[in-house]
Image (cartoon, grey):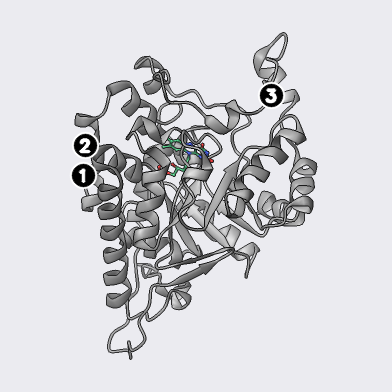
Amino acid sequence: MMHSRIDAYEQAAADHMDPAAFAYVAGGAGAEVTLRRNAGAWVDVTLRSRVLRDMTGFSTACALPGLDLGFPCLIAPMAFQRLAHPEGEAAMALAAAAQGAGMVLSCQTSVAPEQVAIAPFWFQLYLQPDPAATRALAARALAADATALVVTLDAPLNGIRNREIAAGFALPDGVRPVMLDALPPVPSPEGDAIAGLLARAPTWADLAALCAESPVPVLAKGVLTPEDAALAIRAGCAGLIVSNHGGRVLDGLPATAHALPAIRAALPGVPVLVDGGIRSGDDMLRALALGADAVLVGRPAFYALALGGAAQVSACLRRLRDEFSVAMGLMGLRSVGEIGPDCLFTCPST
Ligand SMILES: Cc1cc2nc3c(=O)[nH]c(=O)nc-3n(C[C@H](O)[C@H](O)[C@H](O)COP(=O)(O)O)c2cc1C
C-alpha cells in the first residue's frame, strides 16, 4: 500500500537502478517478514489530536547528543552509497545538512569520512575482533568531526538475504568499504565459518571498553528488549537506537514500533531513537508518540540518491519534514518535546 509520496521512490528506484544493487538495498533476511512488519506497524498507530491550542512559537527543532536538528530525523547508516550515485555518502550528507536532518555515516562507507564531513555527523561502527582496529576507525571518524559514535550490536553475522543472493549481487569495481580497506586484514576463521565468527564476536565488555575510552557519546544500535537496553546503558552508552536493521539480519523479529514502548518505559530520560519502515512524517509523529526522540530513515534516502543525487535526497527529506510539520500542527503540538503518550488514541473497548 502506498501511504505517502516517499513510497514512490522504491518503485522508481527499482526501474532505475542496476537490478542486483536494487536487490541488495531493498531486500530483507529470510522470508522478509520483519521487513514487512516494520512499515505496517507504524500505520496501525492511531493518533489523538487536540484543537484550538495556542501554537505561537511552533518549532520542529530537536537536540540530540552532539547534533542540533531542524526536525527529528537522521539518515540511517547504510553501506556503499556509491552503489546509488558516484558522489555516494558525500551527496547524502550534503542533502541532510541542507534540510536540517542528521547523517549517520556507516563504517562501510564508500567515500572517505574526510570528504563527507560538511556538518556534524554521527559515525556508525561495528566492534572489530581487534580492539586496535575499532579504535582506529573511531579515531579517523573523530578526526573528521564525528560528534557521536553509533555501535551496531545486532549483526555479529550477516543475515541471509535471499533476494540479494538470487540477484547475484557483488560490489562493482570502484565501490569499496574505504575505511575497512585501510585496516590490517583480519584472517578468516579456520574450520566452521559461523562458529569462528561467533567465537570472536564482541561482548558487553568490549562495548564498555569503547564507551570508557570514547571522548564523544556512544549510542547502541540494534536493541529490541528492555534487558539489552539496560545493559547498554550500564556499559556506558549515552543513548539507544531501537532497530532490527531494517529486517536485514534476523527474520522473525518484531516491528520496531512494537519493541519501542517497553524500552522507553524502562529508561525514561535516556535518548532513544528508532528506525525501520519510517515512510512519512506521520510515521515520524507516531514514533515520537511511542517514545522515540528521533527517527532514522534508511532505504527511501538510498533510493532518492539513486534517482537524483543530493538534490533528490534533499527533496525526499523536505517532503518528510513538511509532512512532519503539518502532522504536528494538526495535532496541536508546538514543539517535539510535547509529543508523548497522550498523542496516542486508545480504541474504546466494545
Ligand atoms: C543498503 C543498506 C545498508 C545498510 N548498512 C548498514 C550498516 O552498514 N550499518 C548499520 O548499522 N546498519 C545498516 N543498515 C540498516 C540501517 O541503518 C537501518 O537500520 C534500516 O535500513 C532502517 O530501516 P528502513 O530501511 O526501513 O528505513 C543498512 C540498510 C540498508 C538498506
| Residue highlighted by disc 1 | 8
State which tag comes first along the sequence, 1 or 3: 1
Element at badge 1? helix
Q: Are marks 2 and 1 in contact (CB under 8 Å)?
A: yes
Can you give x and y, in whole percent of width and height, for residue 247 in the image? 45, 37
Q: CA distance from mark 2 to mark 1?
A: 6 Å
| Residue highlighted by disc 3 | 184
Q: CA distance from mark 2 to mark 3?
A: 40 Å
Above or below, 187 against 326 in this view is: above
Residue 333 lies in quadrant: bottom left
Residue 155 lies in quadrant: top right
* Residue at the image point whose x is 66% and y is 44% from the top: 138
Residue 324 lies in quadrant: bottom left
Circle 3 residues within 10 Å: few <14, some 14–19, many ≥20: few
Three-letter residue code for mark 2: Gln
In-front residue for pair 276/208: 208
Can you give x and y, in whole percent of width and height, for residue 283 in the image? 35, 58
Observer-side mark, 1 or 3, equals 3
Q: Are marks 2 and 3 in contact (CB under 8 Å)?
A: no
What's the mark number on residue 11?
2
Quadrant of the image containing the C terminus: bottom left
In-front residue for pair 312/221: 312
Above or below, 26 against 297 in this view is: above
In screen coordinates, is 36 left or right of 11? right
Can you give x and y, in whole percent of width and height, for residue 301 in the image? 34, 45
State which tag comes first along the sequence, 2 or 3: 2
Circle 2 residues within 10 Å: few <14, some 14–19, many ≥20: few
Is any atom of residue 169 visible in this view?
A: yes
* Residue at the image point whose x is 66% and y is 58% from the top: 217
